[in-house]
Amino acid sequence: MESAIVNGHFSLFTCDQNMTKCTISLLALLSLLTFSDRGLAMELPNIVLIFGDDMGIDSVSAFNERLGLKTPHIDRLATEGMSLMDAHTTSAVCSPSRYGLLTGRYNWRSRLKRGIVGQWERPLIEQDRLTLPEMLRQHGYATTMIGKWHLGFNWPSKSVDRDGKAKYTENLNEIDFAGPIENGPNGRGFDYWFGDDVPNWPPYAWRENNRLIGNITTTSKELGLTSYQGVAQGPAVDGWELEAVLPEYVRRCTQFIHQQANRDKPFFLYFPMPSPHTPIAPDENWKGKSGISDYADFLLETDWAVGKILGALDETRQAENTIVIFTTDNGTSPKANFDELAAKGVHLTAHWRGNKADAYEGGHRVPLIVRWPGVVAGSTRSDEVVSLVDIMATIADVLNHKLPENAAEDSLSLLPILCGQTAEFPLHEAIICHSISGHFAVRKGKWKAIYCRGSGGWSSPKEPEAQQQGLPPIQLYNLESDPKETTNLYSQYPEIVAELTQVLRRYVQEGRSTPGPRQYNHGKQIHWKNVPWDDAPHPSTDNEN
Protein backbone atom coordinates (compact mmCIF):
# COMPACT_ATOMS: atom_id res chain seq x y z
CA MET A 1 0.00 0.00 0.00
CA GLU A 2 1.25 3.47 -0.86
CA SER A 3 0.35 6.73 0.83
CA ALA A 4 -0.84 9.67 -1.20
CA ILE A 5 -0.25 13.40 -1.03
CA VAL A 6 -3.32 15.37 -2.12
CA ASN A 7 -3.05 19.16 -2.32
CA GLY A 8 0.00 19.02 -0.10
CA HIS A 9 -1.92 16.84 2.37
CA PHE A 10 -1.11 13.23 3.26
CA SER A 11 -4.27 11.19 2.88
CA LEU A 12 -5.01 8.35 5.27
CA PHE A 13 -7.02 6.74 2.47
CA THR A 14 -5.12 5.23 -0.44
CA CYS A 15 -6.12 3.39 -3.58
CA ASP A 16 -4.46 0.62 -5.55
CA GLN A 17 -3.10 1.35 -9.02
CA ASN A 18 -6.22 0.03 -10.77
CA MET A 19 -8.46 2.20 -8.57
CA THR A 20 -10.64 -0.88 -7.90
CA LYS A 21 -10.66 -0.49 -4.17
CA CYS A 22 -9.60 1.89 -1.45
CA THR A 23 -7.92 0.94 1.79
CA ILE A 24 -7.18 2.79 4.98
CA SER A 25 -3.80 2.76 6.62
CA LEU A 26 -4.17 0.63 9.75
CA LEU A 27 -1.28 2.41 11.43
CA ALA A 28 -2.73 5.85 10.73
CA LEU A 29 -6.19 4.75 11.77
CA LEU A 30 -4.99 3.34 15.06
CA SER A 31 -2.96 6.49 15.54
CA LEU A 32 -6.05 8.64 15.46
CA LEU A 33 -8.88 6.49 16.81
CA THR A 34 -9.56 5.02 20.21
CA PHE A 35 -12.71 3.42 21.45
CA SER A 36 -14.42 4.95 24.44
CA ASP A 37 -16.87 3.28 26.80
CA ARG A 38 -19.66 4.93 24.82
CA GLY A 39 -18.74 3.12 21.61
CA LEU A 40 -16.99 4.26 18.46
CA ALA A 41 -15.63 7.75 19.07
CA MET A 42 -12.72 9.65 17.69
CA GLU A 43 -10.46 10.81 20.46
CA LEU A 44 -8.37 13.58 19.02
CA PRO A 45 -4.95 13.99 20.63
CA ASN A 46 -4.06 17.05 22.65
CA ILE A 47 -1.27 19.09 21.08
CA VAL A 48 1.47 21.03 22.87
CA LEU A 49 3.73 23.14 20.67
CA ILE A 50 6.79 24.54 22.48
CA PHE A 51 8.62 27.19 20.49
CA GLY A 52 12.04 28.24 21.82
CA ASP A 53 13.49 31.64 20.95
CA ASP A 54 16.95 32.12 19.38
CA MET A 55 18.09 28.53 19.84
CA GLY A 56 19.80 26.61 17.05
CA ILE A 57 20.06 22.85 16.82
CA ASP A 58 23.53 22.87 18.42
CA SER A 59 21.93 24.16 21.65
CA VAL A 60 20.55 20.70 22.46
CA SER A 61 22.96 18.23 24.06
CA ALA A 62 21.30 15.25 22.33
CA PHE A 63 22.38 16.76 19.00
CA ASN A 64 25.73 18.28 19.96
CA GLU A 65 28.32 16.21 21.77
CA ARG A 66 30.43 19.37 22.18
CA LEU A 67 27.72 21.52 23.74
CA GLY A 68 29.41 21.48 27.14
CA LEU A 69 26.03 21.67 28.91
CA LYS A 70 23.21 19.19 29.39
CA THR A 71 19.61 19.72 28.30
CA PRO A 72 18.07 16.61 29.90
CA HIS A 73 14.42 17.47 29.35
CA ILE A 74 14.73 18.27 25.65
CA ASP A 75 16.95 15.19 25.38
CA ARG A 76 14.14 13.20 26.98
CA LEU A 77 11.82 14.29 24.17
CA ALA A 78 14.40 13.11 21.64
CA THR A 79 14.54 9.74 23.40
CA GLU A 80 10.77 9.40 23.46
CA GLY A 81 10.06 10.75 19.97
CA MET A 82 11.49 11.48 16.54
CA SER A 83 14.12 14.13 15.86
CA LEU A 84 14.06 15.69 12.41
CA MET A 85 17.71 16.53 11.93
CA ASP A 86 17.43 18.66 8.78
CA ALA A 87 14.63 21.00 9.87
CA HIS A 88 14.57 24.69 9.00
CA THR A 89 12.70 27.83 9.90
CA THR A 90 11.36 29.89 7.01
CA SER A 91 13.33 32.88 8.27
CA ALA A 92 16.47 33.42 10.31
CA VAL A 93 14.64 35.89 12.54
CA CYS A 94 11.70 36.03 14.88
CA SER A 95 8.34 37.29 13.63
CA PRO A 96 8.62 36.04 10.03
CA SER A 97 9.35 32.50 11.20
CA ARG A 98 6.34 32.70 13.53
CA TYR A 99 4.22 33.69 10.57
CA GLY A 100 5.39 30.59 8.68
CA LEU A 101 4.77 28.31 11.66
CA LEU A 102 1.20 29.47 12.25
CA THR A 103 0.11 29.75 8.61
CA GLY A 104 2.04 27.06 6.69
CA ARG A 105 3.05 29.79 4.24
CA TYR A 106 6.46 31.31 3.55
CA ASN A 107 6.80 34.60 5.39
CA TRP A 108 8.15 36.47 2.36
CA ARG A 109 4.79 36.01 0.67
CA SER A 110 3.37 38.47 3.23
CA ARG A 111 4.01 42.22 3.23
CA LEU A 112 7.20 41.64 5.26
CA LYS A 113 10.08 41.24 2.81
CA ARG A 114 12.88 41.76 5.32
CA GLY A 115 13.42 42.36 9.02
CA ILE A 116 10.80 41.85 11.70
CA VAL A 117 7.49 43.30 12.81
CA GLY A 118 8.30 46.56 14.57
CA GLN A 119 7.15 48.03 17.85
CA TRP A 120 3.48 49.08 17.72
CA GLU A 121 3.14 47.66 14.19
CA ARG A 122 -0.16 46.34 12.78
CA PRO A 123 -0.83 42.57 12.48
CA LEU A 124 1.25 40.62 9.99
CA ILE A 125 -1.07 37.61 9.60
CA GLU A 126 -3.85 38.59 7.24
CA GLN A 127 -7.33 38.64 8.79
CA ASP A 128 -8.83 36.15 6.33
CA ARG A 129 -5.93 33.69 6.45
CA LEU A 130 -6.46 30.27 8.03
CA THR A 131 -4.11 29.73 10.96
CA LEU A 132 -3.10 26.61 12.83
CA PRO A 133 -5.15 27.46 15.96
CA GLU A 134 -8.20 28.43 13.90
CA MET A 135 -8.04 25.11 12.06
CA LEU A 136 -7.86 23.28 15.39
CA ARG A 137 -10.73 25.32 16.78
CA GLN A 138 -12.87 24.17 13.85
CA HIS A 139 -12.37 20.63 15.19
CA GLY A 140 -13.48 21.46 18.70
CA TYR A 141 -10.10 22.20 20.29
CA ALA A 142 -9.64 24.62 23.17
CA THR A 143 -6.86 26.81 21.81
CA THR A 144 -4.59 28.56 24.29
CA MET A 145 -1.42 30.55 23.82
CA ILE A 146 0.88 31.51 26.66
CA GLY A 147 3.98 33.45 25.65
CA LYS A 148 5.52 35.66 23.00
CA TRP A 149 3.43 36.74 19.98
CA HIS A 150 5.54 39.24 17.97
CA LEU A 151 3.17 39.30 15.01
CA GLY A 152 1.63 42.72 15.55
CA PHE A 153 -1.56 44.20 17.00
CA ASN A 154 -4.10 46.90 16.29
CA TRP A 155 -3.33 49.33 19.09
CA PRO A 156 -6.24 51.51 20.29
CA SER A 157 -5.95 55.23 19.74
CA LYS A 158 -6.92 57.87 22.27
CA SER A 159 -8.90 59.58 19.53
CA VAL A 160 -11.91 58.45 17.51
CA ASP A 161 -12.90 58.93 13.89
CA ARG A 162 -15.61 61.32 12.64
CA ASP A 163 -18.31 58.75 13.36
CA GLY A 164 -17.14 58.31 16.93
CA LYS A 165 -15.69 54.86 16.28
CA ALA A 166 -12.43 53.66 17.79
CA LYS A 167 -9.30 54.17 15.73
CA TYR A 168 -6.04 52.23 15.61
CA THR A 169 -2.59 53.76 15.75
CA GLU A 170 1.08 52.82 15.42
CA ASN A 171 2.19 56.01 17.20
CA LEU A 172 3.21 55.36 20.81
CA ASN A 173 2.10 58.81 21.96
CA GLU A 174 -1.44 58.18 20.69
CA ILE A 175 -1.96 54.71 22.19
CA ASP A 176 -4.68 54.26 24.80
CA PHE A 177 -3.27 51.47 26.96
CA ALA A 178 -6.59 51.15 28.79
CA GLY A 179 -8.41 50.24 25.59
CA PRO A 180 -8.83 46.88 23.82
CA ILE A 181 -5.75 45.73 21.90
CA GLU A 182 -7.19 43.96 18.87
CA ASN A 183 -6.20 41.32 16.32
CA GLY A 184 -3.43 39.73 18.29
CA PRO A 185 -3.63 36.02 19.19
CA ASN A 186 -7.38 36.19 19.95
CA GLY A 187 -8.03 37.56 16.49
CA ARG A 188 -6.04 34.78 14.83
CA GLY A 189 -7.55 31.65 16.31
CA PHE A 190 -6.72 31.51 20.01
CA ASP A 191 -9.51 31.32 22.59
CA TYR A 192 -7.16 32.59 25.28
CA TRP A 193 -3.82 34.38 25.41
CA PHE A 194 -1.57 35.47 28.24
CA GLY A 195 1.80 37.09 27.64
CA ASP A 196 3.92 40.20 27.52
CA ASP A 197 4.60 39.82 23.79
CA VAL A 198 8.26 40.70 23.04
CA PRO A 199 10.08 40.57 26.40
CA ASN A 200 12.69 43.22 25.50
CA TRP A 201 10.16 45.67 24.00
CA PRO A 202 7.55 47.89 25.61
CA PRO A 203 5.02 47.93 27.04
CA TYR A 204 6.51 46.07 29.97
CA ALA A 205 3.28 44.62 31.31
CA TRP A 206 1.25 41.44 31.21
CA ARG A 207 -1.55 41.15 28.71
CA GLU A 208 -4.53 38.84 28.97
CA ASN A 209 -6.52 38.41 25.78
CA ASN A 210 -7.05 41.95 24.45
CA ARG A 211 -6.37 43.88 27.65
CA LEU A 212 -3.26 45.13 29.37
CA ILE A 213 -3.06 44.20 33.06
CA GLY A 214 -2.20 47.05 35.41
CA ASN A 215 -1.51 50.71 34.80
CA ILE A 216 1.35 52.23 32.85
CA THR A 217 2.98 54.55 35.38
CA THR A 218 6.69 54.36 34.66
CA THR A 219 9.30 53.42 32.04
CA SER A 220 11.83 50.69 31.55
CA LYS A 221 14.62 53.22 32.04
CA GLU A 222 13.26 54.37 35.40
CA LEU A 223 13.02 50.73 36.50
CA GLY A 224 16.62 50.05 35.47
CA LEU A 225 15.58 47.50 32.83
CA THR A 226 17.51 49.17 30.02
CA SER A 227 20.74 48.07 31.71
CA TYR A 228 19.93 44.57 30.39
CA GLN A 229 21.23 43.72 26.94
CA GLY A 230 18.75 44.49 24.18
CA VAL A 231 16.03 46.05 26.34
CA ALA A 232 14.35 49.04 24.69
CA GLN A 233 13.17 52.17 26.43
CA GLY A 234 9.42 52.50 26.80
CA PRO A 235 6.33 52.46 29.03
CA ALA A 236 6.04 49.96 31.87
CA VAL A 237 3.98 49.01 34.89
CA ASP A 238 5.64 49.56 38.22
CA GLY A 239 7.60 46.61 39.60
CA TRP A 240 8.15 44.83 36.29
CA GLU A 241 10.87 42.17 36.55
CA LEU A 242 12.40 40.55 33.49
CA GLU A 243 13.47 37.49 35.50
CA ALA A 244 9.85 36.72 36.32
CA VAL A 245 8.69 36.29 32.73
CA LEU A 246 9.72 32.70 31.98
CA PRO A 247 8.71 31.28 35.41
CA GLU A 248 5.29 32.93 35.14
CA TYR A 249 4.74 31.46 31.68
CA VAL A 250 5.70 28.02 32.96
CA ARG A 251 3.38 28.35 35.95
CA ARG A 252 0.45 29.24 33.72
CA CYS A 253 1.21 26.51 31.16
CA THR A 254 1.31 23.81 33.79
CA GLN A 255 -1.82 25.22 35.43
CA PHE A 256 -3.63 25.08 32.08
CA ILE A 257 -2.58 21.46 31.51
CA HIS A 258 -3.87 20.49 34.95
CA GLN A 259 -7.18 22.27 34.28
CA GLN A 260 -7.69 20.27 31.08
CA ALA A 261 -7.26 16.87 32.72
CA ASN A 262 -10.93 16.15 33.30
CA ARG A 263 -12.43 17.95 30.34
CA ASP A 264 -13.87 16.28 27.27
CA LYS A 265 -12.52 18.84 24.82
CA PRO A 266 -9.05 18.28 23.29
CA PHE A 267 -6.65 21.16 23.78
CA PHE A 268 -3.94 22.95 21.84
CA LEU A 269 -1.34 24.74 23.94
CA TYR A 270 1.08 26.98 22.06
CA PHE A 271 3.99 28.02 24.27
CA PRO A 272 6.30 30.42 22.41
CA MET A 273 9.04 30.89 24.97
CA PRO A 274 10.87 34.16 25.66
CA SER A 275 14.16 32.34 26.09
CA PRO A 276 17.04 32.13 25.58
CA HIS A 277 16.42 35.39 23.64
CA THR A 278 17.52 38.68 25.18
CA PRO A 279 17.04 40.00 27.78
CA ILE A 280 19.27 37.31 29.22
CA ALA A 281 17.54 37.22 32.58
CA PRO A 282 17.72 33.88 34.40
CA ASP A 283 15.54 33.59 37.49
CA GLU A 284 17.28 33.66 40.85
CA ASN A 285 16.90 29.88 41.10
CA TRP A 286 18.99 29.53 37.94
CA LYS A 287 21.42 32.39 38.15
CA GLY A 288 24.90 30.91 38.60
CA LYS A 289 23.63 27.37 38.06
CA SER A 290 25.92 26.65 35.12
CA GLY A 291 28.99 28.25 36.63
CA ILE A 292 29.70 29.62 33.14
CA SER A 293 27.60 32.69 32.28
CA ASP A 294 24.13 34.19 32.57
CA TYR A 295 23.40 32.94 29.07
CA ALA A 296 24.31 29.37 29.97
CA ASP A 297 22.10 29.69 33.05
CA PHE A 298 19.23 30.92 30.86
CA LEU A 299 19.67 28.01 28.46
CA LEU A 300 19.45 25.58 31.38
CA GLU A 301 16.34 27.36 32.63
CA THR A 302 14.83 27.02 29.15
CA ASP A 303 15.37 23.27 29.30
CA TRP A 304 13.83 23.22 32.80
CA ALA A 305 10.73 24.92 31.40
CA VAL A 306 10.32 22.13 28.84
CA GLY A 307 10.65 19.62 31.66
CA LYS A 308 7.88 21.28 33.66
CA ILE A 309 5.50 20.97 30.69
CA LEU A 310 6.35 17.29 30.30
CA GLY A 311 5.96 16.81 34.03
CA ALA A 312 2.49 18.37 34.02
CA LEU A 313 1.40 15.98 31.27
CA ASP A 314 2.76 13.05 33.28
CA GLU A 315 1.12 14.18 36.52
CA THR A 316 -2.29 14.50 34.85
CA ARG A 317 -1.93 11.25 32.88
CA GLN A 318 -2.40 13.08 29.59
CA ALA A 319 1.00 12.30 28.08
CA GLU A 320 -0.19 9.19 26.23
CA ASN A 321 -2.77 11.15 24.26
CA THR A 322 -0.74 14.31 23.66
CA ILE A 323 1.45 15.22 20.73
CA VAL A 324 4.39 17.30 21.96
CA ILE A 325 6.35 19.30 19.40
CA PHE A 326 9.52 21.13 20.38
CA THR A 327 11.20 23.49 17.95
CA THR A 328 12.55 27.05 17.81
CA ASP A 329 12.18 30.21 15.73
CA ASN A 330 15.75 30.57 14.38
CA GLY A 331 19.40 29.98 15.14
CA THR A 332 21.26 31.14 18.22
CA SER A 333 21.95 34.84 18.63
CA PRO A 334 25.54 36.09 18.81
CA LYS A 335 24.43 37.93 21.95
CA ALA A 336 25.08 34.61 23.65
CA ASN A 337 28.77 35.58 23.30
CA PHE A 338 30.12 32.57 21.43
CA ASP A 339 33.78 33.31 22.19
CA GLU A 340 33.24 33.61 25.93
CA LEU A 341 31.26 30.38 25.99
CA ALA A 342 33.76 28.51 23.81
CA ALA A 343 36.59 29.53 26.14
CA LYS A 344 34.65 27.77 28.91
CA GLY A 345 33.89 24.65 26.88
CA VAL A 346 30.41 25.52 25.57
CA HIS A 347 30.15 25.29 21.77
CA LEU A 348 26.91 26.58 20.27
CA THR A 349 28.20 26.68 16.69
CA ALA A 350 29.96 23.32 16.59
CA HIS A 351 28.47 21.97 13.38
CA TRP A 352 27.04 24.87 11.37
CA ARG A 353 28.26 28.17 9.99
CA GLY A 354 26.57 31.40 11.02
CA ASN A 355 23.96 32.37 13.56
CA LYS A 356 20.60 34.07 13.94
CA ALA A 357 19.77 36.43 11.03
CA ASP A 358 22.00 34.60 8.52
CA ALA A 359 21.24 32.70 5.34
CA TYR A 360 23.90 30.21 6.48
CA GLU A 361 22.73 27.02 8.19
CA GLY A 362 23.34 28.44 11.66
CA GLY A 363 20.63 31.00 10.98
CA HIS A 364 17.76 28.64 10.30
CA ARG A 365 18.63 24.99 11.09
CA VAL A 366 16.77 24.26 14.31
CA PRO A 367 15.78 21.35 16.56
CA LEU A 368 12.45 19.75 15.67
CA ILE A 369 11.27 16.90 17.89
CA VAL A 370 7.86 15.23 17.79
CA ARG A 371 6.65 12.89 20.54
CA TRP A 372 3.40 10.98 20.09
CA PRO A 373 3.30 7.83 22.25
CA GLY A 374 2.13 4.75 20.39
CA VAL A 375 2.44 6.44 17.01
CA VAL A 376 5.92 7.93 16.69
CA ALA A 377 8.70 5.53 17.64
CA GLY A 378 11.11 6.74 20.30
CA SER A 379 14.82 7.42 19.76
CA THR A 380 14.31 7.74 16.01
CA ARG A 381 15.77 10.28 13.63
CA SER A 382 14.96 11.47 10.13
CA ASP A 383 17.32 13.23 7.74
CA GLU A 384 14.47 14.41 5.51
CA VAL A 385 14.77 18.11 4.59
CA VAL A 386 11.74 19.77 6.17
CA SER A 387 10.49 23.23 7.09
CA LEU A 388 8.46 24.50 10.02
CA VAL A 389 5.72 25.41 7.56
CA ASP A 390 5.09 21.64 7.43
CA ILE A 391 3.61 21.60 10.93
CA MET A 392 0.33 23.05 9.59
CA ALA A 393 -0.27 20.25 7.05
CA THR A 394 0.92 17.65 9.56
CA ILE A 395 -1.70 18.68 12.10
CA ALA A 396 -4.27 18.85 9.30
CA ASP A 397 -3.46 15.19 8.63
CA VAL A 398 -3.93 14.29 12.26
CA LEU A 399 -7.38 15.87 12.08
CA ASN A 400 -8.11 14.47 8.60
CA HIS A 401 -8.77 18.11 7.68
CA LYS A 402 -8.77 19.05 4.02
CA LEU A 403 -6.85 22.29 3.70
CA PRO A 404 -8.41 24.85 1.36
CA GLU A 405 -6.49 25.85 -1.75
CA ASN A 406 -5.68 29.30 -0.37
CA ALA A 407 -4.20 28.09 2.92
CA ALA A 408 -0.87 26.53 3.96
CA GLU A 409 0.43 26.96 0.42
CA ASP A 410 3.94 25.79 1.34
CA SER A 411 3.11 23.07 3.85
CA LEU A 412 3.47 19.29 3.39
CA SER A 413 2.55 16.69 5.97
CA LEU A 414 5.28 15.03 8.01
CA LEU A 415 2.92 12.30 9.18
CA PRO A 416 4.30 9.59 6.84
CA ILE A 417 7.81 10.32 8.11
CA LEU A 418 6.68 10.37 11.73
CA CYS A 419 4.91 7.03 11.26
CA GLY A 420 8.12 5.49 9.91
CA GLN A 421 7.04 5.19 6.30
CA THR A 422 9.71 5.32 3.63
CA ALA A 423 9.31 7.21 0.38
CA GLU A 424 10.93 6.90 -3.01
CA PHE A 425 11.25 10.67 -3.41
CA PRO A 426 12.01 13.56 -1.03
CA LEU A 427 9.02 15.17 0.66
CA HIS A 428 9.89 18.60 -0.76
CA GLU A 429 11.25 19.37 -4.18
CA ALA A 430 13.03 22.24 -2.39
CA ILE A 431 12.61 24.48 0.62
CA ILE A 432 13.24 28.22 0.89
CA CYS A 433 14.88 30.06 3.78
CA HIS A 434 15.16 33.81 4.23
CA SER A 435 17.70 36.02 6.02
CA ILE A 436 17.01 39.16 8.06
CA SER A 437 17.99 41.33 5.09
CA GLY A 438 15.55 39.51 2.83
CA HIS A 439 18.09 37.38 0.95
CA PHE A 440 16.97 33.94 -0.18
CA ALA A 441 18.49 30.52 0.28
CA VAL A 442 17.20 27.53 -1.71
CA ARG A 443 17.82 23.98 -0.52
CA LYS A 444 17.31 21.02 -2.84
CA GLY A 445 18.79 17.70 -1.76
CA LYS A 446 22.45 18.17 -0.96
CA TRP A 447 22.64 21.51 -2.77
CA LYS A 448 22.07 24.92 -1.27
CA ALA A 449 22.18 28.24 -3.14
CA ILE A 450 22.37 31.55 -1.29
CA TYR A 451 21.48 34.69 -3.23
CA CYS A 452 23.87 37.14 -1.63
CA ARG A 453 27.62 37.67 -1.38
CA GLY A 454 27.95 37.19 2.38
CA SER A 455 25.90 35.96 5.31
CA GLY A 456 22.82 38.00 4.49
CA GLY A 457 22.69 38.68 8.21
CA TRP A 458 24.90 39.47 11.17
CA SER A 459 27.91 37.18 10.86
CA SER A 460 30.98 37.99 8.79
CA PRO A 461 31.11 38.78 5.99
CA LYS A 462 28.14 41.11 5.96
CA GLU A 463 27.06 42.36 2.56
CA PRO A 464 29.15 45.58 2.36
CA GLU A 465 32.23 43.65 3.50
CA ALA A 466 31.58 40.83 1.03
CA GLN A 467 31.16 43.30 -1.81
CA GLN A 468 34.44 44.99 -0.94
CA GLN A 469 36.10 41.58 -1.03
CA GLY A 470 34.72 41.01 -4.52
CA LEU A 471 32.84 37.86 -3.53
CA PRO A 472 30.42 36.47 -6.14
CA PRO A 473 26.73 37.45 -5.92
CA ILE A 474 25.59 33.85 -5.44
CA GLN A 475 26.92 31.05 -3.24
CA LEU A 476 26.49 27.33 -3.85
CA TYR A 477 27.34 24.69 -1.29
CA ASN A 478 27.26 20.90 -1.22
CA LEU A 479 25.99 20.30 2.31
CA GLU A 480 26.68 16.58 2.05
CA SER A 481 30.43 17.08 1.75
CA ASP A 482 30.68 20.62 3.16
CA PRO A 483 28.11 21.09 5.96
CA LYS A 484 29.91 24.18 7.32
CA GLU A 485 29.58 25.98 3.96
CA THR A 486 33.26 26.72 3.47
CA THR A 487 33.71 26.23 -0.30
CA ASN A 488 31.57 28.18 -2.75
CA LEU A 489 30.99 26.01 -5.85
CA TYR A 490 29.01 28.68 -7.69
CA SER A 491 31.37 28.91 -10.67
CA GLN A 492 31.90 25.14 -10.91
CA TYR A 493 28.25 24.11 -11.17
CA PRO A 494 26.37 26.82 -13.08
CA GLU A 495 23.72 24.28 -14.11
CA ILE A 496 22.88 23.58 -10.44
CA VAL A 497 22.65 27.30 -9.71
CA ALA A 498 20.34 27.72 -12.73
CA GLU A 499 18.15 24.83 -11.57
CA LEU A 500 17.76 26.17 -8.02
CA THR A 501 17.15 29.68 -9.32
CA GLN A 502 14.34 28.46 -11.54
CA VAL A 503 12.76 26.68 -8.58
CA LEU A 504 12.80 29.89 -6.56
CA ARG A 505 11.31 31.91 -9.40
CA ARG A 506 8.55 29.36 -9.91
CA TYR A 507 7.68 29.31 -6.22
CA VAL A 508 7.46 33.10 -6.22
CA GLN A 509 5.38 33.28 -9.38
CA GLU A 510 2.94 30.52 -8.43
CA GLY A 511 2.30 31.82 -4.94
CA ARG A 512 2.89 28.34 -3.55
CA SER A 513 5.43 25.53 -3.48
CA THR A 514 2.96 22.65 -3.07
CA PRO A 515 0.58 21.12 -5.64
CA GLY A 516 -2.51 23.18 -6.28
CA PRO A 517 -3.84 26.20 -8.18
CA ARG A 518 -1.84 29.39 -8.31
CA GLN A 519 -2.19 31.76 -5.38
CA TYR A 520 -0.99 35.32 -4.89
CA ASN A 521 1.71 36.82 -2.76
CA HIS A 522 0.88 40.03 -0.89
CA GLY A 523 -0.21 42.69 -3.36
CA LYS A 524 0.10 40.11 -6.17
CA GLN A 525 3.84 40.77 -6.13
CA ILE A 526 6.35 38.63 -7.99
CA HIS A 527 9.11 41.24 -8.26
CA TRP A 528 10.85 42.81 -5.30
CA LYS A 529 14.40 43.33 -4.12
CA ASN A 530 16.46 40.15 -3.68
CA VAL A 531 14.33 37.95 -5.96
CA PRO A 532 16.82 36.86 -8.68
CA TRP A 533 15.20 37.73 -12.02
CA ASP A 534 17.00 37.86 -15.35
CA ASP A 535 14.80 40.73 -16.50
CA ALA A 536 15.42 44.39 -15.77
CA PRO A 537 14.04 45.74 -12.47
CA HIS A 538 10.33 46.41 -12.32
CA PRO A 539 10.02 49.76 -10.50
CA SER A 540 6.23 49.66 -10.34
CA THR A 541 6.21 46.49 -8.24
CA ASP A 542 9.67 46.52 -6.62
CA ASN A 543 8.32 47.25 -3.15
CA GLU A 544 9.84 46.04 0.10
CA ASN A 545 6.93 47.05 2.33
Image (cartoon, rainbow, N blue to C red):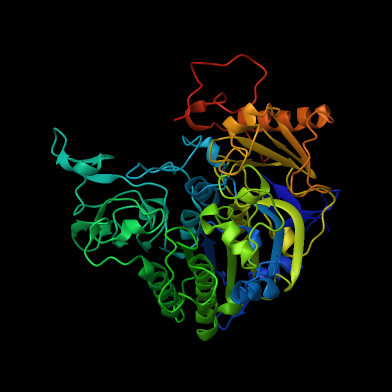
Is any atom of residue 289 visible in this view?
yes
Q: From this viewpoint, which residue is outermost toward the front?
A: 343
Location of residue 43 by image quarter: bottom right
Front position in the image: 350 or 157:
350
What residue appears at the point 61 percent right and 73 percent down from the top-left corner? 71
What residue appears at the point 58 percent right and 69 percent down from the top-left corner? 324
Question: Where does the image place residue 350, in percent across and percent down from the top left?
Answer: 70, 58
Q: Is residue 465 left or right of residue 274?
A: right
Q: Is residue 383 left or right of residue 189?
A: right
Question: Where does the image place residue 28, in percent across and percent down from the top left?
Answer: 71, 65
Question: Where does the image place residue 126, in percent across and percent down from the top left?
Answer: 43, 41
Is any atom of residue 41 visible in this view?
no
What residue appears at the point 46 percent right and 59 percent down from the top-left corner? 137
* Quadrant in the picture for the C terminus: top left
Front position in the image: 481 or 540:
481
Location of residue 327 by image quarter: bottom right
Front position in the image: 223 or 327:
223
Front position in the image: 526 or 405:
526
